[in-house]
Structure formats: C-alpha cells, structure tokens
Image (cartoon, grey):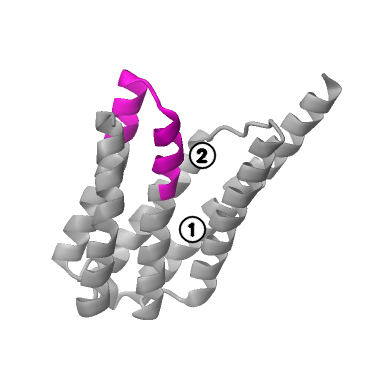
Amino acid sequence: MTPANVITVARLLATPVVVVMVAMHGAGWWPFAVAFTIGATDGVDGWLARRQGTTRSGAFLDPLADKAVVLSLLFVLAAKAEFSWVPVGLIAAREVGMSVYRSLAGRRGISIPARNSAKIKTLVQGIAILLALTPPVTRHGYVLSMAIWVAVAMTLGTGMQYLVDGRRAAGLREAA
C-alpha cells in the first residue's frame, strides 16, 4: 500500500459516511466539509502517485473511487430532489459505459489513457455536488440546475473524446 493508495482507500471509505449524512439530513456544512475533503484528497493522491510512482492497484482504485464518490452523491442528491434524475442518469450512463468500454478495450490490448479534460470533468462534477451541499445555494435551484447541466456537457464531451481515442488506438493497433 503506497501513501497514494491509502488516501484513495480512505476516500472510498468516507463515501458512505457522507452519503448517509446527506440522506438523513440533506445539504449542510458538515456534508459539504466531508465531500470537499474527499475531493481535495483526490488531488493529493494523484500528486503523490506521480511523485512516488503509480501502481496497478492505484490505477484501478483511483477512478473507482472517483466514480463511487460522484455517482453515490449524485444519486442521493437526486433522491433529495436537489438535482433532477435526468442529468444524473446521463452522467451515470456515461461513467458506467466508459468503464465498460475501457475495460473491453484493455482486454484487446488497447490502452485509452486518462485525458486532462476528464480530470477537469471530475472537478466540474465535484463543484456541482458541492454547490448542492452548500446551504445558501440550495435555495437557488437555477444555480444547481445550471451546474449539473454543465457537468453533463463536460461528462458527455469527454465520453466522446474517449470513444474517438479508442477507435484511433484500435486503428493504429490493426495497422501495426
């Protein structure tokens, strides 16, 4: 277990805590603080991994943690009517679909590395979630709606980039 992997596992373990907080009490400063900490430590574990060397387990766990945090919080926020289910469903479909796509491509020996735009996408999703957890903002549904739809646009846009990357990598592999 590298320090980066320890942080990633801690993020995974903290996710159910914040989900239960939101499910039971809704938006608030405590859920905001926990979610913010989970998001901030995503950057820390990435920085540590780049400095100390990446691992296969980290390469698997980090995106898993990102998806677990984002999707579980989006689901609970939709259940609490902070977000509409439509954008949450679109984000969930893209996240699950891309995970399956990258896994199937990997089985064929095709690597589709993470793009910087996908990292920005995760940040935008996190900002939308944090806005929905911020008590003064929850009274402004139009702000939350705009934030989640910007996240949807980024999410679907990066999904299209990955599909293009995968097709290009498959074409290069077949040409070789």
- For disc 1, the marked residue is 150
Judged left or right of residue 4, residue 169 is right
Q: Which mark is residue 117?
A: 2
Q: Which residues are magenta?
A: 44-64
Which of marks 1 and 2 precedes in the sequence? Answer: 2
The picture places residue 130, in percent across and down from the top left corner, at 29, 60
Q: Image point 28% across, 29% down: which residue?
A: 2
Callout 1, which amino acid? Val
Three-letter code for the amino acid on which mark 2 is drawn: Ser
**Mark 1, secondary structure of its residue:** helix
Q: Mainly helix, strand or loop, the magenta region?
A: helix
Magenta segment includes 56: yes
In the image shown, does 61 or 78 lie closer to the viewer? 61
Instruction: Quarter of the image for the N terminus: give it.
Output: top left
Location of residue 70 by image quarter: bottom left
Give x and y (percent) for residue 126.
36, 54
